[in-house]
Image: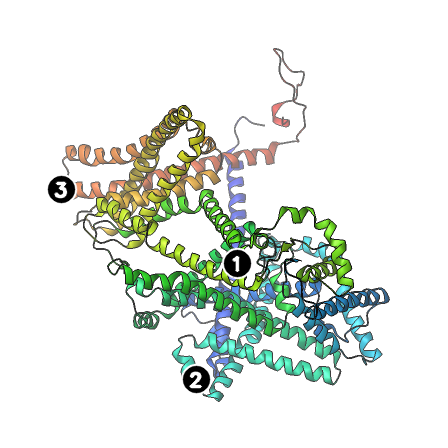
Amino acid sequence: MPSRLPIQDIFAGLVTSIGTAIRYWFHYTLVAFAWLGVVPLTACRIYKCLFTGSVSSLLTLPLDILSTENLLADCLQGCFVVTCTLCAFISLVWLREQIVHGGAPQWLEQNHQQPLNGVGQQNEAQAVVNGGVENAVLDQPANPAAENAVVGENPEIQEEQVDEEEEDNEDEEDAVVEDAADANNGAQDDMNWNALEWDRAAEELTWERMLGLDGSLVFLEHVFWVVSLNTLFILVFAFCPYHIGHFSIVGLGFEEYVQASHFEGLITTIVGYVLLAVTLIICHGLAALVKFQRSRRLLGVCYIVVKVSLLVVVEIGVFPLICGWWLDICSLEMFDATLKDRELSFQSAPGTTMFLHWLVGMVYVFYFASFILLLREVLRPGVLWFLRNLNDPDFNPVQEMIHLPIYRHLRRFILSVIVFGSIVLLMLWLPIRIIKYLLPNFLPYNVMLYSDAPVSELSLELLLLQVVLPALLEQGHTRQWLKGLVRAWTVTAGYLLDLHSYLLGDQEENENNANQQPNNQHARNNNAIPVVGEGLHAAHQAILQQGGPVGFQPYRRPLKFPLRIFLLIVFMCITLLIASLICLTLPVFVFSVFAGRWLMSFWTGTAKIHELYTAACGLYVCWLTIRAVTVLVAWMPQGRRVIFQKVKEWSLMIMKTLIVAILLAGVVPLLLGLLFELVIVAPLRVPLDQTPLFYPWQDWALGVLHAKIIAAITLMGPQWWLKTVIEQVYANGIRNIDLHFIIRKLAAPVISVLLLSLCVPYIIASGVVPLLGVTAEMQNLVQRRIYPFLLMVVVLMGILSFQVRQFKRLYEHIKNDKYLVGQRLVNYERKSGKQGTSTTPPQSSQE
């Protein structure tokens, strides 16, 4: 091999690499054009063609697809349509898996297949157990439980079993053998599949092969199937339900009301789905009447799909929307607004208004569910039997949507609306009325959408999102405080009303539970059951899980139990009302608002600021004060010397933290925001004949955001000195903060680079350029454009450095392709003062 490669070899290698790059470029361009152009554009044009309602649009569809008008808008809309169709397809596949693994509803499986002997015997045994339990439950009113008897939780199991018994009684017993055989064959088709073949097909079809990123043209077939699937789903799941609903609404004369809602398409489609579900129920009944088993099963599965879809829309869309609107209506007086204002905002921007109310409702539902989970950690298992446990591993909402009848879901929906609406009335509307009566000047809050302050609201919003909310939400102390308050209230209410056993349980009952169970079983067999809820719940859990009850703990029932439960509910409502008043007024919210206003006055002067910022600032101060008080209270039992030692340590740590915060959260974001303003914002927004104005607070707030983004990208990137230092600082934490290490390794280098980036261009533009004798216009041009020019120079240097490294790699690749004979694996031997014994030349070996 020559010492240097000949020019013709380098040139040939360059030509080969350029040819390969061009070939890949053409292929990837074709892939991008197919997936990002053809598929969404075809979906959008077909969607518009189907919903124009004219025959001429169908005839001109090929020409409309090839049209070049509104390409970008149609591609974006087509991407949304394709996403919806793919989500619908994935949802259908997942729903099929739920039906296959979880089992279809009993009304769909009746007379569909004859059970095998073993399965039939097991079902008969379970039916006997169910019958025994139901008979025992029906006998309970004749033998009421004695006072102070030990009882357990009583969920809605009885009603479910009665419903199942009614469905069992409706089963037809005269199915013909041919139908049963056909049903057996149909059921076996789902079971007789070869897992190895499916796994082999899944291994062959990868994402690269499916999208065409592997260099093959097989993806063109996938593009055709995706376009066909989009067309089919648009026709079946959008076109047909919409027109069914449209014809029904026009026929009933409700067209004007639907148009006034500003969501004509959505409401019409939902009405079409509802009518389609009713039609499927009727057709399913007719097919069962004439014993068309295959048609009956197909119609039943279609009804399950429509039913689950409508229930998902109601649970995820309608219910949070109702909660959001109800929260807004109940809080109108707090913001000095009226229903007329909300109507005007809805008329001006219906989509945005509905989305904001839905988002507020989702947040409310989420925090309500989080509070229920916290209650389950405090209360006895079984107190909240009427609420579904989201942490239960056996909880599957989709299975409930499939199996439970529609009236059960309707009843749950009405009950949820009543409960959530009552909580809003109790904790928002009623406290606001009381506050306006007692403190007329306290409300309303200032929630203007504009700011007459010299400080941009963007900086305040970023401060709220980046500093205040993480401190309030990411700390576990707040949750522990709330849990402690709930436990204290529960203990107090339990002893006041003699419901301690019911709310928290008894340890002695847990110890004697094993001795009481045989007696309870004996009493149950004699139809004299002092344990009302335990037998039903235990039997039901034993049937479903083949074992004892899970999450069950008995309790002792006191005298006048219903009256005590009523008093407990009243006490709970009064407590919620008082807690809401405290949170909205004294001491937390009043202190937070006034303290926040006082603190914000140093920032903004006499200008009015959104109350959200003042409340957030005050709450942050309140949180810091409460945290300091709790820490001091925890130190009190340790003695005065320990307290002084702790105060000294914490004071030193706070001083170090303040220094680090001033450097990393003050100086660095300010310099970074100012540099971003000079490099990007000012050249784009301010003309050359105008003077740019800089707002330090706004630049600092934007710098905080940029610093967090840069830190996140650094931590996700490759290993280099800045990532190592940041990881070390994060690992040390606040308690083990190393001020010398942070200043020497992190703050000083970063601040030096930022100061050099700011000062060097300014010195060149203001000190060097005037010495050259240029005109004033040229000096102004240099001063205004030197920062983006230097950024461009840095970027070009980075690109050149990258190209040099790539050329070196290409050089090595050409050399290896032409002259490399082979590679040999050589054992690594640590050199200990003498030469290794290997004589392998470096050109043909690798270590």
The mark lying in front, picked from 2 and 1, is 2
x, y percentage for residue 295? 71, 79
Q: Amino acid at mark 3?
A: Ala
Badge 3 element: helix
* Near-viewer residue (105 or 577): 577
Give neighbour class at mark 1: few <14, some 14-19, many 20+ (Cα, 10 Å). some
Residue 167: quarter of image: bottom right
Q: Are marks 3 and 1 in contact (CB under 8 Å)?
A: no
x, y percentage for residue 630? 41, 38
Give neighbour class at mark 3: few <14, some 14-19, many 20+ (Cα, 10 Å). few
Is any part of residue 788 visible from this angle?
no
* Distance from the alpha carbon under mark 2 to that under mark 1: 46 Å
The residue wearing badge 2 is: 255
x, y percentage for residue 359? 43, 61
Residue at image position (63%, 80%) is 280
Residue at image position (68%, 55%) is 202
The residue wearing badge 1 is: 30
Q: Amino acid at mark 2?
A: Glu
Q: Where the N terminus falls, by quadrant?
A: top right
* Near-viewer residue (505 or 841): 505
Badge 2 element: helix
Q: Amino acid at mark 1?
A: Leu
The mark lying in front, picked from 2 and 3, is 2
Q: Is residue 361 above or below residue 262?
A: above
The residue wearing badge 3 is: 776
* Near-viewer residue (655 or 506): 506
The numbered dot on residue 466 is: none
Give neighbour class at mark 2: few <14, some 14-19, many 20+ (Cα, 10 Å). some
x, y percentage for residue 139? 72, 70
Q: Is residue 545 left or right of residue 489?
A: right
Q: Are marks 2 and 3 in contact (CB under 8 Å)?
A: no
